[in-house]
Amino acid sequence: MGIHRRQVVTGALLAAGGAAAGAALVAPRWPLGPDRLPISGGYAPAGVARVWSARGEVPVVWHVSTTEPLVALTFDDGPGPRWTPMVLDILDRAAAPATFMMVGERLTRYADLLRGRLGRHEVGNHTWAHRDLAELDEAGVRDQLERADEAIRRLLGRTPTLMRPPWGHLGGSTLTVADEFGYDVVMWSQQMREEMFQHDPPAQVTDIVDNARRGSIVLAHDVGADTRLVALRQLGAMIDGLRGRGFRLVTVSELLAAATPPSTPRL
Ligand SMILES: [Zn+2]
């Protein structure tokens, strides 16, 4: 990737040099810029936003500083017919809220699964088609977020205020477009480790429960390979374990609303 990119840039510089030597007046076509695709995810600046947005900045959160014993569970990539209903059932039984980072295209297919079931839960934007936003320019990111935002509003009657980039990949263009939409960018501080605990479900529970801290944001998935089930089937036990340690489960927006000044000095 790096070599390819260097070759492209070198080629452009040579072209520019040739043009100067020949006194040609045609400007070289610079391969990078806000109207071009980032090369291998390389160029997606945050400083050339085309829209004068309200904030000019965007929060990127992976855990929340709070004095309250709060934890937010998040489920990415749904909705899906195999496990989303099961996850909602478990959360219902536990009366536990969660935040679902939804893929717009899947939402249009499976919105019926969610009807009347999202009362206590929050919905965030996880793009239209689970594209790697770090490889897209502003227009590409805007398209991914806009279509999913529209689907969430139309099909669920919700106005999302959060987005999570697939795989946590962030380019500058994601930040500027997230600001346009008024989104906070939500990452995570803990995640299910299904591969590691594939044959040891209790250890998956312990890993989540014991490592949770005030303000943790926990990443799980309600769509994907069967290996995910080691976490989803233990969800009830995790919620019990977290509550046993005194934690209260909240949505991400509730967690953000409970933020307090950081208690840990930076030095
Ligand atoms: Zn995802």
Image: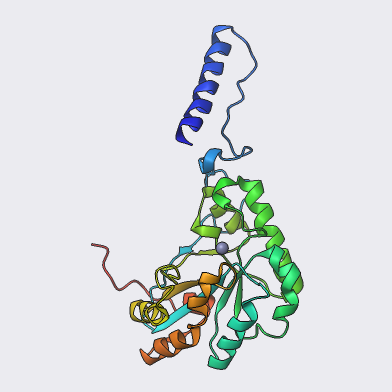
In the image, taking residue 63 as reference, residue 221 lies left or right, namely right
Asked which quadrant contains residue 246, the reply is bottom left
- Residue 235 higher or lower than 101, as above or below: below
Residue 59 vs residue 232, the one in the foreground: 232
Residue 31 vs residue 66, the one in the foreground: 31
In the image, taking residue 155 as reference, residue 66 lies left or right, namely left
Asked if residue 257 can be seen in this view, the reply is no
Asked which quadrant contains residue 125, the reply is bottom right
Query: How are the colours assigned in the image?
Result: rainbow
Q: Position of residue 148 (x, y in %)?
A: 69, 63
- Residue 20 higher or lower than 265, as above or below: above
> Image point 73% across, 64% down: which residue?
150
Asked which quadrant contains residue 64, the reply is bottom left
In the image, taking residue 107 as reference, residue 183 lies left or right, namely left
On the rendering, which quadrant does ligand 1 occupy?
bottom right
Asked if residue 255 can be seen in this view, the reply is yes
Q: Position of residue 65 (x, y in %)?
A: 38, 73
- Residue 20 higher or lower than 185, as above or below: above
> Image point 70% across, 80% down: which residue?
114
Q: Position of residue 33 (x, y in %)?
A: 58, 36
> Image point 54% across, 7% down: which residue?
21
Residue sitting at the far left: 267
Residue 164 vs residue 59, the one in the foreground: 164
Q: Position of residue 172 (x, y in %)?
A: 52, 49
Count of numbered marks: 0
* Quadrant for the C terminus in the image: bottom left
Residue sitting at the far front: 199
